[in-house]
Amino acid sequence: MLDRQKNPQLNSHGELKHLLTIEGLPREILIAILDSATPFTGIAEREMKKLPLLRGKSVFNLFFENSTRTRTTFEIAAKRLSADVINLNINTSSASKGETLLDTVDNLAAMQADMFVVRHASSGAPHLIAAHLAATGREHIHVVNAGDGSHAHPTQGLLDMYTIRHYKQDFTGLTVAIIGDILHSRVARSQIHALTTLGVPEVRVIAPKTLLPTSVERLGVQVFHDMREGLRGVDVVMMLRLQNERMNGALLPSPQEFFKSYGLTPEKLALAKPDAIVMHPGPMNRGVEIDSAVADGAHAVILPQVTFGIAVRMAVMRMLAGGPA
Amino acid sequence: MLDRQKNPQLNSHGELKHLLTIEGLPREILIAILDSATPFTGIAEREMKKLPLLRGKSVFNLFFENSTRTRTTFEIAAKRLSADVINLNINTSSASKGETLLDTVDNLAAMQADMFVVRHASSGAPHLIAAHLAATGREHIHVVNAGDGSHAHPTQGLLDMYTIRHYKQDFTGLTVAIIGDILHSRVARSQIHALTTLGVPEVRVIAPKTLLPTSVERLGVQVFHDMREGLRGVDVVMMLRLQNERMNGALLPSPQEFFKSYGLTPEKLALAKPDAIVMHPGPMNRGVEIDSAVADGAHAVILPQVTFGIAVRMAVMRMLAGGPA
Amino acid sequence: MLDRQKNPQLNSHGELKHLLTIEGLPREILIAILDSATPFTGIAEREMKKLPLLRGKSVFNLFFENSTRTRTTFEIAAKRLSADVINLNINTSSASKGETLLDTVDNLAAMQADMFVVRHASSGAPHLIAAHLAATGREHIHVVNAGDGSHAHPTQGLLDMYTIRHYKQDFTGLTVAIIGDILHSRVARSQIHALTTLGVPEVRVIAPKTLLPTSVERLGVQVFHDMREGLRGVDVVMMLRLQNERMNGALLPSPQEFFKSYGLTPEKLALAKPDAIVMHPGPMNRGVEIDSAVADGAHAVILPQVTFGIAVRMAVMRMLAGGPA
């Protein structure tokens, strides 16, 4: 059990107050989120997709870094809970007028926000906002991290866990491989914390040395530089997106070279278990980190990830702001 | 009657499933849309403009080409039907991250969309999306073409037909002239298909040779190069917008020259029937294709077109996704 | 009593029809708006923040000048009244297609708008729109000025009055100082008209000569160039934002110099009454017009201004379009 005084995500009763990172979240909280997401996946089959759980609440999507895709997932999740949603692309507004991040937050908080969904290019921005709300007596406003720098992307990590549990039922017998640019990936960090917390006995990372954090082993993972070796016998293959800015950088020879060594092809995938699933957080670079034959193949669960992602975000929002279950 | 196997817009019962183009749509479908739009025009007089016909449905406005005006008409139509509306300007998002069109569509479909309203600079993009949804077993998602390249703009064509019927009651005795840049106009193409399907006996196109498609006569229209000759005795004058990119191009001498030959002035309009109506899809270039005295004059029905456009879009959305009438 | 024939903001019964400027508005209207805002401030404490007063109404935010902050305040106010809100950033759309302002307005009006919230870089644009709606028989559409050029920002003026009344109860015994770039400030103009209409006996403006309008005394204010002198004994300190474009201009030596002479520091504030309140319309330039020790200090009511601003905008929208109180 954590020292809850030190975990800014939990209130004094150990309940989730903000979702900033998966690191340090108790296993029971992760499980509770996954469990409460299940009824929201069934919403797809209904004629009526809207539930009144957040009716009258104001959710502000604060995107200091542009991401239409992620913003859309939170927007649709909030609207299906009947919240009022306000989208703000902050780079085009007050930020350019010289206002500080915390002045912007203060102002929006004063508009009686109930939740901030925050995307920011700087690691730690959502923590900073949560700490500022606490310091100014406004802890009733909830913060959800929608991706901060290379730090964390907790809802992505949670939807990945939901997906794994959906297809594999149990975490405790699995071997999982995460492949690609671990160094710069907030997604990888959130995945590793979630997998180890949920009891996955073997988490592998597969990457060239230049795309691995130093001392990555301390996170409880096994390191592989050879993809074929790393894929052998795994139950779950989690691909990462190779970001454009890396492709032209000094860390990599070329996208083609990367594909040759670390791109997922049917031939390499054949080394995993026969019933292995393939995941990707999107958007995919086909022919760079993943071959189209795999992306569109029978092992891929990439689109179910998206569907589960809406349900998981609904579950998080409801747990934070929706009152008793 | 069409071979319905070949018309991707209709389901096996001959009902409208997508609205991609007016070309090939049965007359009875066009009439059904116009008929069902009528009650929605009355909504203006009510205190309460909202109807619950699409409540809980998710409508995604996928605008790969920017058009605030057209996006707004669909947004307001969907909101008046109580749908949840998500606006996506795709050029600023995943498209720039290298994701393919169909991957973007797959992702949004996985968010349990009910309808895609698609605007794209490339002709055929909405068809491609509809075909992809069919190929991947997701035909329950409806596609509405909001303008694709120089191909089609079917809701514009439908609102134009609604307007003509409102003022002229019957299509079967009319002479209609379409004037301007026929070659590049998706609007003109949709208008011609709608007019001929609805039984207008004489459809004229008036344009310089450089702004006419080759073999335009095959569409069932009469060609005029002289505006005065073409306007003589017409019931309906449908002006087209001269797009900015044409004005500086090799196809035209200058906007002033164009106005002299093909701009609609009161003097030229006097050659039409005394009760002729003047239409324009907007936004107007005053002094280029239309004189302000005509745009603001007694014959113009340009603003009623806009009002009817909301009602027609509501009718289309309701027919596609709103359940039984 | 005004000649109501000349005041385009009032209907023939003397009721508010548009909110274009505070100048010339009867005192009883200002008081009615402030009074009706009070219940909306209580909304913060409720679980359910939404009221159905504008349900089914369509509010168009027409922002010809970008301002995410102001747009957000109107959007959240309208949504809490259950209106449908359509946001339009017009510089990126039809305006760039060469359409005139009034053609854009005509089009949106034809979509059966109930209210236009207008922000424009040109002084008088909202008046022009209101006059055009009157001239074309569409006075049922209400116009709210959300800031036009250097002319007026009436909802800012109203929320400032609400804030003063909240903390000082009565206007008739107060001394109020407005400090900064009076010359270019629409906020200052709206504040001066509101304060004098509501009976504040002493309104001071404090600014260098280069940032004062000629004959500013005619507005009923006392002019000070020395900040210490002007602050002596005041009840209310209203800071203005120094706009970036001024900082590099010929009118000012440098932001540092400005701060030295006209920046509000704890030391200068000590010259005001001990219970003086400090206001700022935001976004603040800390270290330019206001010291952080003051901005975050005990006298500042800058964040309550924001909260009251939502309530005042709800009150205005409801008075204009919400039916009988």
Image: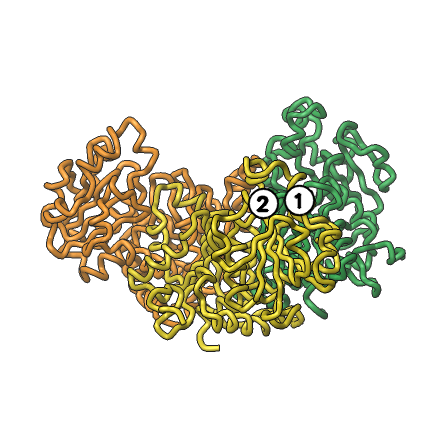
Chain colours: A green, B orange, C yellow
User: Residue C301 appears in which quarter of the rendering?
Assistant: bottom right
Task: Answer whether labels 1 and 2 touch (C-beta < 8 Å).
Answer: yes
Neighbour tally class for label 1: few under 14, some 14-19, many 20 plus, Cα within 10 Å: some
Residue toward you, B46 or B172: B46
| Vertical comparison of A188 with B313: above or below | above
Residue B242 pos. (x, y %): 29, 39
Chain of the residue where label 1 is placed in the rendered structure: C
Tell me which amino acid carries mark 1.
Answer: Ser
Residue under circle 1? Answer: C261
Residue toward you, A310 or A246: A246
Q: Residue at x 36, y 69 (%)?
A: C4
Residue A307 pos. (x, y %): 61, 53
| Helix, strand or loop status at disc 1 | helix
Mark number displayed over residue C208 = 2
Tell me which amino acid carries mark 2.
Answer: Pro
User: Residue A11 appears in which quarter of the rendering?
Assistant: bottom right
Quadrant where the N terminus of chain C is found in the figure: bottom left
Chain of the residue where label 2 is placed in the rendered structure: C
Q: Which of the marked residues, 1 or 2, is nearer the chain's N terminus? A: 2
The mark total stands at 2
Residue toward you, A193 or B231: B231
Neighbour tally class for label 2: few under 14, some 14-19, many 20 plus, Cα within 10 Å: many
Residue A246: tell me if it is visible.
yes
Q: Residue at x 59, y 72 (%)?
A: C38
Residue toward you, A95 or A264: A95
B75 horizontally vs B38: left or right: right
